[in-house]
Image (tube, rainbow, N blue to C red):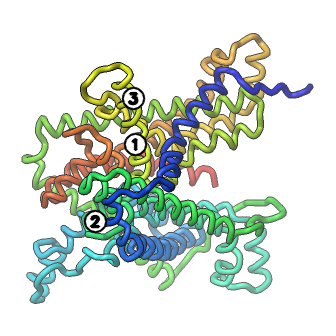
Amino acid sequence: MKTRYIWWNGWVGAATVLLILVCMPVFTLLAHLVTSASDQWQLVAPKIVDSYLKDTLLLLGGVALCTFLIGTSAAWIMSSYEFPGRKYMEWLLILPMAFPSYMMAYSYIGLLEYTGPIHSFFRNKAGWQLSGPLIDLMNLPGGVFIFSITLFPYVYLFARTSFLSSSKEVQEAASLLGSSPWRTFFSVALPMARPAIAGGIALASMEVLNDYGTVRYFGLNTFTTGIFRAWLTLGDLDSAIKLASILTLIVLLLLWAEYFQRGDKRWTSKSGRTAPAARLALSGAGKWSVVAFCTVIACIAFVLPFGQLVYWAVRTAHKVLDHTFGLIVMKSFLLASFSSLLIVMLAIVLLYTVRVSGIYRMRYITRIASLGYAIPGAVIAVGIMAPVIGFDKWLLHISGQHGPLLLSSGLFMLIFAYAVRFMAVGYNAIDGGFQKTGQDVNDAARTLGCSSWQALWRVDLPLIRKSISAGLLLVFVDVIKELPLTLILRPFNFHTLATKAFDMATNEQIAESANASLIVILTGILPIVLLNRIIRNNT
């Protein structure tokens, strides 16, 4: 039977409108690249190469190297060796993902300051005469350290999944040819895992470029701090847009460079056999050295900073946990719930359009909507602000009224920005559900007389309810943790848990900020545990 293609209907029209809206920030930035520069730009431009570009590239390079070393080595150990406590370390090494990097920075500053527990131990118990912080992290190497211990789980997860699904046949062939375990790792397993590792490093790099809290707290001059400085200090939207445009070009260049360097090389086994190799049981010194390595990483990346936040929260809870704080928690959860519901609904519209249109390339077209996750939050915020404010002014002009801007004075811009930024999270979760159910069930329902709406409501949605739940949960957690977008686009005097923690820390109330930070981190732990269970069950 000949396939029937539907080039235009309500679903295709809705998907087209959504794609235009989601891509609008990028269109805005590209348009402003060719506009004339403002007077304030003359103050900002000289800092681009000497400060913003230098610090940004040094951060990216340092974090890429450290996350590769920590994440890949931990992933290889977890997937290849059996040792005491391995099952607990599997998920413990993922938990740093629940830590926003700026909250990790606050914790370590508290741990290492003069009155902190580590400094006090060496001063009081060991008799060391120390002044100032034990280790000064308020610099570029300190930023690399904070980002690395927070973001290495991206590389760890991707590499571990690849190692677990690597062909047992290939690794056994290497062993039969006399290859040692380390040589097998470098010559077989590592090359086969390269796309996964590169993907993890790319995600970690995107998080570095998106960050504002850590670089602002450490006084680093990155493009993100430059965007905030241009907009909030100079009040110059044009300079902020130009900086955002340059940062977007850097992101695209990094993604293209990795894709180009990979070329057309093959990274899979031709046989298609993907049974994982058996783990090697360690004994003696090797066993305990591996246990020590994993324990040190887990303590540095999660146990110590989390313990510091718990200590602060217990000490300051009586001063912070009041009616106002309860309202902030309620606002944060309501905002995240509404945003996640909206994003998942939009993702369903895009993916169902692919199903009902029958056009194969429609899948690639709709996937454009997920590109916002690769763009830093500050860039999206600036790219949305200009057209929405312009549209607001146009509405007031044609209505002949004078008053406050409607769309840009409330939560509309913020929720819109969340949709652009986190569409990829909801899209990928829903896409996985649609892929598992297949096209046949929908075709059968349509053949039996159901309309497209009825088939979606009565057949497809019940079958993908687990994917919908996963998408809602993942987007909810991302919205709760988001800082740059919320700082720029939130209404006046509107706080979320992330902005409250940031404001209190920048006002030297680091201990008090732990209460909001703990709620954000505990909220993020649940999907991480579920993610680890999914990886274990699928390999």
Residue 30 percent coordinates (x, y): 52, 52
Q: In percent of the image, x 32 and y 20: which residue is there? A: 400
Q: Which residue is mark 1?
A: 386
Kindly report which numbered mark, 1 or 2, lies closer to the viewer in this rendering.
Answer: 1
Crowd class of label 3 (few under 14; some 14 to 19; many from 20; radius 10 Å): few
The furthest residue to the top: 449
The furthest residue to the right: 1
Earlier sequence position, callout 2 versus callout 3: 2
Q: In percent of the image, x 32 and y 32: which residue is there? A: 334
| Residue 105: numbered disc | 2
| Residue 394: numbered disc | 3
Kindly report which numbered mark, 2 or 3, lies closer to the viewer in this rendering.
Answer: 3
Q: Amino acid at mark 2?
A: Ala
Q: Quadrant of the C terminus?
A: bottom right
Q: Amino acid at mark 3?
A: Trp
Kindly report which numbered mark, 3 or 1, lies closer to the viewer in this rendering.
Answer: 3
The answer to whether 325 appears left or right of 37 in the picture is: left
The answer to whether 353 appears left or right of 371 in the picture is: right
